[in-house]
Amino acid sequence: MERLLAGKKMRFAAIVLLSGGILTNLKAQEPEVLSLDLNQAVEFALSESPTVKVANKEIEKKKYAKKGAYAALFPQVDFGADYSRTLKKQVMYMDGAFDIESMMSPVFNGIDNTFANSVSGYKPGTLAEEIAKENAKIPQTNSEEGISVGRDNNWSFGFTAGMPLINVSLWKSLSISGIDVELAVEQARSSKIDMVNQVRKSFYAVLLANDSYKVFKESYDNAMENYTDIKKKYEQGLVAEYDLIRAEVSVRNVEPNMLQAQNALGLAQWQLKALMGMDLEQKIICSGELKDFEPELFADYVATDTTLNENTNLKQLDIQGRQLDAKLKMEKFDYLPTLSLSGLYQWNSMNNNFKFGDYKWNPYSMVGLKLTIPVFSGGSRLNKVRQTRVTIEQLSMQRDDLSRNLKLAVKQSLDNMATCVKRFDAAQKGVKQAERGYEISQKRYDTGAGTLLEMNDSELALTQSKLNFNQAIYDYMVAKSELEKILGRVNNKSNLF
């Protein structure tokens, strides 16, 4: 019996130790909680967000395109090889008499005289007789039949080169490539500004959810404390059962709000992690509270500069306007002559078989200049110029309309900020009065001068005033972030641009 008990104790101890080790490993595997402030969240998003990475890749792509455009100024050298099989040879025709003997007789006579004077035993006229005999052996053809020329296999390989010497339109296109890079940089800046705005608003949303949860948690704790106190008084016969029921109902009414605020906090954190490009399973804590931004409200509002010089949308339209101006000049330059240099060096061979060792390769080289003067194109160049001019006018109209809308958006943001400042001032005073009213209602109820309904109403008013206080700060910071996005600027404290 003792051995059996001892064995059970040993097995129990082993299970405890094993479970303790498993719990330790699970705790070690849990991701570390990451604490972030606003600037850290923004910096993390700018370094890890896929949107920003795509914008940076676009800049890199435009830079390579610019380098590729400059390559058109350098010589272009290519190597090529060609083979063709003649299925039916080309036929050449010769009209009129073609007497080789008569054409070559002066040459033959000169050679015959040379042989007669220098070769002993040579009889004058022998060369002419032999040529006449050989010519008689060649079958006579009719001029209507033609002569087949060429061979079955035609081979060629070699190098070709060319480069522009004078091409004003090409030179102007290089400046357009440079403007493309500038536009890509501005678009990347726009992506970063938009990302900063979204991260900031999401961070403020986390703080708002967290502060709201704290307010409801505090309200829940107050309701639970009142319920506990009333329950003790009820057990002592000092209060009626109605007060106990009313206190318990107050606890049940506050609890769903607290749980909903807790869920909202988790959702806001998930949205922030998604914006930052962070692993969604990573646990984070947003340090700080909305009231930490309270000292900045009035100072930022008074010092706001509303000029639109840094607005990224207007800057992009200005860069696009420069692109169109350069394109218009390039299209006008299409009317100018162009001069180019070309050359080649090839080896050719023509044979009737595939005995490559017997092939004879004949080199061929050439260097040339090509002058092209535009004369008539059916109006295509003129219509391109007209089309670009209309596009420039459209862009100018779009810029004017965008500028008006941006000024209106700035005014709306400033009005929202002014309203939020007034709301904040009212909410701040409301919190102080609500806290004082709640203290008074508690004392009145404890002394029997007040009712539970008064205390519940004062507690509800305190909760609502704190929520209004946090909401006013949140709305102000969101409006301020939107204004900075419109103006194309961010807070200098972040040192992000």
Image (spheres, rainbow, N blue to C red):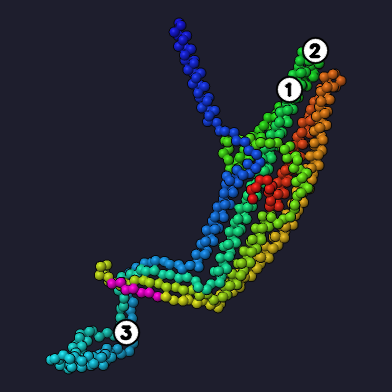
Frontmost of labels 3 and 1 is 1
Which residues, given as a range, are shown in magenta? 360-366
Q: Nearer the viewer, mark 3 or mark 2?
A: 2
Contact (CB < 8 A) between labels 2 and 1? no
- Crowding around mark 2 (Cα neighbors within 10 Å: few <14, some 14 to 19, many 20+) is few
Give above or below for 336 relative to 112.
above
Does residue 455 show up? yes
Quadrant in the rendering for residue 428? top right
Left or right of 286, for residue 26: left
Q: Amino acid at mark 2?
A: Gly
Which element is circle 1 on? helix
Tag 2 residue = 237
Within-10-Å neighbours for mark 3: few <14, some 14–19, many 20+: few
**Residue that appears at 66% across and 65% down:** 392
Q: Is residue 1 above or below residue 41?
A: above
Report which residue position mark 3 lands on: 144
Q: Are marks 3 and 2 in contact (CB under 8 Å)?
A: no
Q: Nearer the viewer, residue 188 or 151?
A: 188
* Residue 473 % position (x, y): 75, 40
For disc 1, the marked residue is 224
Most extreme residue toward the top, as rendered?
1
Q: Main secondary structure of the magenta part?
A: strand
Q: Could you say whether the residue bearing mark 2 is in a helix, strand or loop?
A: loop
- Residue 76: x and y in percent read 45, 67
Q: Nearer the viewer, residue 488 or 380?
A: 488
Distance of mark 3 from mark 2, alpha carbons?
Answer: 140 Å
The residue lying at 34 percent from left, 77 percent from top is 90
**Residue at 61 percent of width and 44 percent of height:** 43
Q: Is residue 257 at least partly visible in the picture? A: no
Identity of the residue furthest to the right in this view: 449
